[in-house]
Image (cartoon, rainbow, N blue to C red):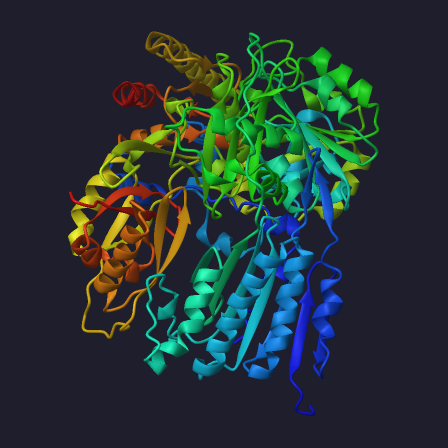
């Protein structure tokens, strides 16, 4: 009769952790909210989809190849990345989305009592992986919506192992320029691993935006994350990678889960990376729709945050979660931002004009 | 085995598991209780107490009663409870155990878990007989001294009246968990404090420390007398222990001299809903209330919680962060009443859920869920001839001149039972009478007809406040 005390089996840091529950599939959401169509503006996906060549790979994939394991370490993709960036293939580790490579790095360098340092209002997965792995996540408040370099440096102690910088930052779109990033790396002076997550780097056109990969030779403690989910429109296939100095990547390789990236993702990514026209067209769409949103949000008198990346944040005079439900009823799905520690803000993915219009119309109706 | 009763003890704080045979002296429990006073952790500049607890697993044998008595009484003392409260809790535990010994024919063993909640002590009985008659837990139970069968239930009645709250819940597998809570006694605020008259124009959030919390508790009673103040804010030491326990949290705003001039308190009442109290503002400085609310929301934005409930909002609650749930009536006497708004907000996306309804309630729920834009799959519950318990059980939770009933068990006598409760409350001059119905539990929705028959009205849906959404009913006397 005795109830099995499962809780005694579970580490406290797991018991105290909130499981992330993703949103339901579109048909379920449409049924729940009674809408006939749904514009998904919550995940910063590319409305243009993958580059043309990647689309052809997807269309032409022979079904029988699904029975065969993929390359366990994304061999050809790493060769391609090495060619593009002029590095050694072993400097790359490919994961099932950039989320997976976050885990690789944390597992490789942290042990009980260690901490990681990042911002309080940034991509949550650095914090989550650290916390549910039993490590402390030191969260430094943003300063003027950007990562605060000095405050992050002040948080470093002898148990600090990794500093995570999201550049440009999701969700504020702010970034550290070349000078600021280098100054920070100089101050860290190789004592900790510095991860620069460049998930949205392809959206930034400013000259002073730093290319983390180009800094690897100068800073061997630097690790750069990139993804094919955003600009390259392969979010549904889950593929991202990290790149670093050979010494650092050889350590991270020990915690890398092999065979986690499927064949289709690897092949689509190889063909995506060369498509400069896809990047140009996406940037064009993002710029045009950001300008449209800026104008409309200004005329509604709503405060907004529009910087780099394919997203904007808007502060509402009502609860963000209520706005989410009301917009869902009109077929527009946005991201509530209280979970990012921005109460009453919503984040909107830049999408095709029709979707942006639907969002603005929806907003007008609910406010 | 030599036939002596076996007690299994487990103390998770020190990860000690031991079995002891009981002779005359009580070795096992005492041995482990001596460890329990230890365990403090420092977090965020404020000292939180680690919740030390222990468990006993024992057969249902009357000769085990001294083990039980000594364990609970000593634990309560170690946990800082005064003797009067400790004895009341011990009495309640003893009475429940005795009742189980005589009526729990289907129970082979019972597991007892004792937890130090810092401002309360909680004792849980975990057993495997769902049909054990707990009817005497009803506050309104009257025991006739001439009726021997009723006298057997006297123990449960004594237990119910000796503790502050009790809950019955399904536990893992087929087990049932009966939880008894006894709060510690604290001195009340001696006199209303007030800030000096000097002008204040700046504020900053202060580190949460014991003395700051006491200042908050001392200043709050001086606010507008019409304002609803939760009873725990009248006991500074209790507020400190509540925050120390980690169950409640607070944020404080201070002036340039770091004097407390505002504050907000919240409680994670279950894993899904955070109950918010305040903000309470003692010096009007623009933006201070909003800063406290934003700080609070940032703190819980990535927590387990799904939503925030402000059942008795202060006038400084910034409405743009919340949704109006509905209104409840606050009675100050039998005929005087005023309406009070209740507010809510979710912290993320609503994932939808199934709720159970009685046909008499369906239209109300549909209209409310539509108004609140909450996606719910509303399912009717119908009796298809299945047997229903003869006896219903409701627990009563008192505070601030109000009582909240919670159904423990459905029963054929629900209407009469509710009526008896209402008579008792009328006699005690309690006019704010609520009942919480958990819409995720199909059996509770069957209580709709007896509630309507007793002039209860559904007044608020509290999303995610129970296992699912709670429907709050209010008794409307004379309407």
- Does A85 sit above or below residue B287? below
A84 left or right of A340 in image: right
- For image coordinates 34% across by 43% down, the residue present is B462
Query: As drawn, is B463 to the left or to the right of A15?
Result: left
Q: Residue at x 30, y 30 (%)?
A: A326
User: In this image, B415 relative to A212: left or right?
Assistant: left
Q: Position of residue A274 (x, y in %)?
A: 56, 26
Between residue B27 and residue B276, name the one nearer to us.
B27
Image location of residue A29, percent across then percent down? 32, 41
Instruction: Return the residue nearer the eye: B89 or A241.
Output: B89
- Quadrant in the rendering for residue B396: bottom left
Q: Residue A313, relative to residue B455: is it above or below?
A: above
Q: As rendered, which of B40 and A148 lies closer to the eye? A: B40
* Residue placed most toward the observer, B395 or B234: B234
Q: Quadrant of residue A239?
A: top right
Q: Is residue A168 visible?
A: no
- The residue positioned 60% from the left and 32% from the top of the image is B213
Is residue B100 toward the left or the right of residue A143 in the image?
left
Q: Quadrant of the N terminus of chain B?
A: bottom right
Residue B469 point in image, percent of width and height: 34, 48
Q: Quadrant of residue A49?
A: top left
Residue that appears at 22% across and 55% down = B451
Q: Which residue extends farthest bottom?
A: B2
């Amino acid at each position: 009769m005795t109830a099995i005390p499962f809780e005694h089996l579970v580490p406290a840091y797991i018991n105290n952790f909130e499981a992330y529950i993703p949103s339901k599939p579109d048909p379920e959401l449409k049924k729940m909210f009674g809408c006939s169509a749904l514009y998904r503006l919550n995940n910063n996906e590319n409305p243009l989809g993958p580059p043309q060549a990647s689309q052809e790979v997807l269309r032409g994939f022979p079904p029988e190849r699904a029975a065969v394991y993929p390359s366990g370490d994304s061999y050809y993709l790493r060769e391609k990345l090495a060619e593009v960036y002029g590095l050694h293939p072993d400097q790359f580790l490919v994961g099932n989305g950039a989320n997976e490579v976050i885990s690789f790095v944390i597992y490789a360098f942290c042990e009980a009592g260690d901490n990681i340092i990042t911002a309080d209002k940034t991509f949550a997965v650095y914090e989550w992986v650290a916390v549910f792995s039993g490590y402390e996540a030191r969260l430094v408040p943003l300063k003027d919506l950007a990562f605060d370099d000095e405050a992050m440096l002040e948080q470093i102690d002898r148990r600090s192992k990794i500093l995570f910088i999201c550049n440009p930052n999701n969700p504020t779109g702010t970034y550290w320029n070349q000078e600021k990033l280098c100054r920070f790396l100089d101050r860290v002076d190789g004592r900790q691993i510095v991860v620069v997550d460049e998930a949205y780097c392809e959206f930034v056109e400013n000259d002073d935006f730093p290319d983390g990969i180009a800094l690897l030779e100068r800073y061997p403690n630097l690790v750069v994350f990139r993804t094919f989910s955003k600009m390259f429109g392969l979010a549904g296939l889950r593929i991202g990678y990290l790149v670093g100095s050979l010494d650092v990547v050889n350590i991270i390789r020990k915690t890398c889960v092999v065979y986690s990236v499927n064949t289709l993702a690897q092949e689509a990514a190889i063909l995506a990376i060369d498509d400069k026209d896809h990047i140009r067209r996406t940037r064009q769409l993002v710029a045009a729709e950001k300008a449209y949103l800026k104008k409309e949000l200004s005329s509604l008198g709503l405060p907004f945050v529009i910087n780099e990346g394919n997203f904007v944040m808007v502060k509402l005079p009502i609860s963000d979660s209520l706005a989410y439900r009301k917009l869902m009823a009109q077929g527009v799905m946005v991201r509530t931002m209280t979970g990012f520690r921005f109460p009453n803000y919503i984040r909107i993915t830049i999408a095709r004009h029709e979707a942006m219009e639907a969002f603005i119309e929806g907003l007008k109706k609910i406010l | 085995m030599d036939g002596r009763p076996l007690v299994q003890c487990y103390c998770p704080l020190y990860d000690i598991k031991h079995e002891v045979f009981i002779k005359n002296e009580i070795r096992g429990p005492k041995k482990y209780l001596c460890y329990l006073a230890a365990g403090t952790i420092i977090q965020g500049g404020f000292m939180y107490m680690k919740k030390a607890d222990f468990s006993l697993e024992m057969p249902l044998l009357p000769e085990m009663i001294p083990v039980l008595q000594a364990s609970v009484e000593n634990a309560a003392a170690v946990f800082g409870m005064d003797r009067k409260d400790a004895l009341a809790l011990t009495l309640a535990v003893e009475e429940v155990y005795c009742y189980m010994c005589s009526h729990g024919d289907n129970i082979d063993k019972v597991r007892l878990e004792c937890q130090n909640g810092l401002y309360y002590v909680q004792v849980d009985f975990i057993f495997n007989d769902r049909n054990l008659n707990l009817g005497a837990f009803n506050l309104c139970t009257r025991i006739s001294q001439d009726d021997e069968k009723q006298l057997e239930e006297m123990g449960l009645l004594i237990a119910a009246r000796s503790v502050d709250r009790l809950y019955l819940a399904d536990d893992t597998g087929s087990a049932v968990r009966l939880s008894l809570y006894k709060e510690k006694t604290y001195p009340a605020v001696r006199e209303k404090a007030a800030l000096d008259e000097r002008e204040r124009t700046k504020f900053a959030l202060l580190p949460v420390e014991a003395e700051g919390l006491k200042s908050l508790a001392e200043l709050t009673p001086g606010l507008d007398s019409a304002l609803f103040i939760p009873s725990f804010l009248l006991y500074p030491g209790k507020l400190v222990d509540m925050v120390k326990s980690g169950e409640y949290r607070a944020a404080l705003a201070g002036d340039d001299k770091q004097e407390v001039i505002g504050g907000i308190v919240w409680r994670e009442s279950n894993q899904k809903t955070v109950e918010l109290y305040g903000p309470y503002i003692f010096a009007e400085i623009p933006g201070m209330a909003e800063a406290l609310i934003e700080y609070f929301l940032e703190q819980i934005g990535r927590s387990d919680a799904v939503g925030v409930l402000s059942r008795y909002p202060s006038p400084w609650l910034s409405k743009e962060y919340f949704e109006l749930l509905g209104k409840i009536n606050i009675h100050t006497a039998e005929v005087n009443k005023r309406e009070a708004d209740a507010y809510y907000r979710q912290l993320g996306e609503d994932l939808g859920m199934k709720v159970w309804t009685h046909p008499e309630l369906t239209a109300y729920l549909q209209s409310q869920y539509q108004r609140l834009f909450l996606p719910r799959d509303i399912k009717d519950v119908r009796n298809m001839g299945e047997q229903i318990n003869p006896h219903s059980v409701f627990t009563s939770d008192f505070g601030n001149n109000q009582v909240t009933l919670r159904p423990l068990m459905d029963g054929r006598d629900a209407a009469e039972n509710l009526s008896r409760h209402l008579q008792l409350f009328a006699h005690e001059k309690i006019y704010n009478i609520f009942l919480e119905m958990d819409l995720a539990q199909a059996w509770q929705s069957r209580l709709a007809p007896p509630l309507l028959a007793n002039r209860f009205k559904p007044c608020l849906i509290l999303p995610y406040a129970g296992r699912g959404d709670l429907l709050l009913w209010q008794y409307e006397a004379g309407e």
